[in-house]
């Protein structure tokens, strides 16, 4: 790969094209996103997010940035934790996903600030947030190192970054996981969301994403310290945590 091309699943594309292709995927699936998450993970994504929320341990008065926040699962939980004296920003680069998340937040009785923005160019001042999170969004970003450095930049000293993302499953389970990912997943996408291609991209993007140790190294390279990760679902998902000091 050179600096002008990148991966879109297994396809090699111009960097300028990846954002458009990813946008097309999430615009297509936005309205069925939560339903498909429940089906794909058999509801386990709720447990993974609950673990993330527990590790985050937000406190009253804290400021939180939810990057690629989508349908606002994390933002809603954090809003309850920070209370009236804190603040949670819901952001996403994709308008369709952000609109679903914003409507859900309002339906739940919260009025959170929202912003459509690129994680590689966050429109926030440095040292602004106590916690930054990104759940199942990092693998879709073109320059992961740049995005992680931006997330670190907006953290206050002592603040923490949490990255919840698909990762490398325990090797003995890989054949079964591959069969599920490349056969059953696109079939479900076609039946439920009328979009097999987007869910085929999902399976491919997981395989192209850095594994647990590689992502930890990228986070350290972005300036984060005390980086560690927690394997979930036999490594199919991992939660990475790092701090800004």
Image: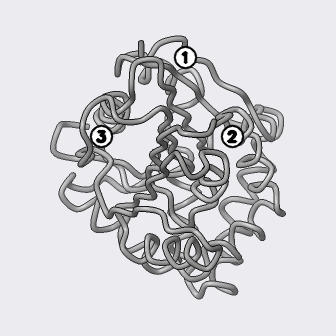
On-image quarter of the N terminus = top left
Nearer the observer, 183 or 229: 229
Of all residues, the one furthest to the front in this rendering is 85
Q: CA distance from mark 2 to mark 1?
A: 15 Å
In the rendering, at what x and y percent does residue 23 appear? 35, 69
In the rendering, at what x and y percent does residue 170 appear? 77, 32
Residue 15 lies, with reference to residue 183, above or below; the image says above
**Tags 2 and 3 touching, CB below 8 Å:** no
Residue corresponding to mark 1: 227
Which mark identifies residue 52? 2
Nearer the observer, 121 or 85: 85
Q: Nearer the viewer, mark 2 or mark 1?
A: 2
Q: CA distance from mark 2 to mark 3?
A: 24 Å
On-image quarter of the C terminus = top left
Q: Nearer the viewer, mark 2 or mark 3?
A: 2
In the rendering, at what x and y percent does residue 212 appear? 60, 27
Residue 245 lies, with reference to residue 242, above or below; the image says above
Residue 159 lies left or right of residue 141; in this view the side is: right
Residue corresponding to mark 3: 143
Residue at the spot 77% in from the left edge and 60% down from the top edge: 41
Residue at the spot 76% in from the left edge and 47% down from the top edge: 50
Nearer the observer, 85 or 7: 85
Residue at the spot 55% in from the left edge and 45% down from the top edge: 207
**Tags 1 and 3 touching, CB below 8 Å:** no
Q: Nearer the viewer, mark 1 or mark 3?
A: 1
Residue at the spot 42% in from the left edge and 77% down from the top edge: 96
Disc 3 element: loop
Residue 97 lies left or right of residue 191; in this view the side is: left
Disc 2 element: helix
Q: Earlier in the sequence, mark 2 or mark 3?
A: 2
Q: Earlier in the sequence, mark 2 or mark 1?
A: 2
């Amino acid at each position: 790969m050179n600096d002008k091309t990148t991966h879109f699943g297994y396809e090699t594309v111009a960097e300028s094209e990846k954002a458009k292709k990813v946008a097309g995927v999430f615009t297509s699936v936005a309205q069925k996103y939560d339903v498909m998450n429940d089906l794909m993970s058999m509801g386990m994504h709720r447990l993974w997010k609950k673990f993330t929320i527990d590790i985050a341990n937000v406190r009253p008065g804290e400021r939180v940035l939810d990057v690629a926040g989508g349908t606002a699962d994390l933002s809603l939980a954090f809003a309850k934790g920070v209370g009236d004296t804190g603040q949670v920003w819901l952001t996403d680069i994709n308008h369709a996903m952000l609109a679903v998340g914003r409507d859900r937040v309002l339906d739940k009785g919260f009025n959170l600030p929202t912003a459509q923005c690129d994680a590689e160019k966050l429109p926030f001042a440095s040292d602004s947030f106590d916690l930054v999170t990104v759940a199942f969004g990092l693998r879709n970003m073109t320059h992961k190192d740049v995005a992680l450095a931006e997330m670190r930049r907006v953290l206050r000293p002592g603040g923490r970054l949490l990255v919840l993302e698909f990762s490398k499953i325990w090797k003995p389970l890989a054949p079964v996981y591959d069969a599920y990912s490349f056969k059953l997943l696109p079939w479900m996408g076609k039946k439920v969301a009328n979009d097999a291609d987007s869910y085929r991209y999902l399976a491919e993007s997981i395989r192209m994403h850095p594994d647990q140790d590689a992502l930890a190294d990228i986070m350290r390279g972005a300036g984060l310290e005390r980086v560690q990760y927690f394997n979930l679902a036999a490594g199919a998902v991992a939660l990475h945590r790092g701090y800004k000091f």
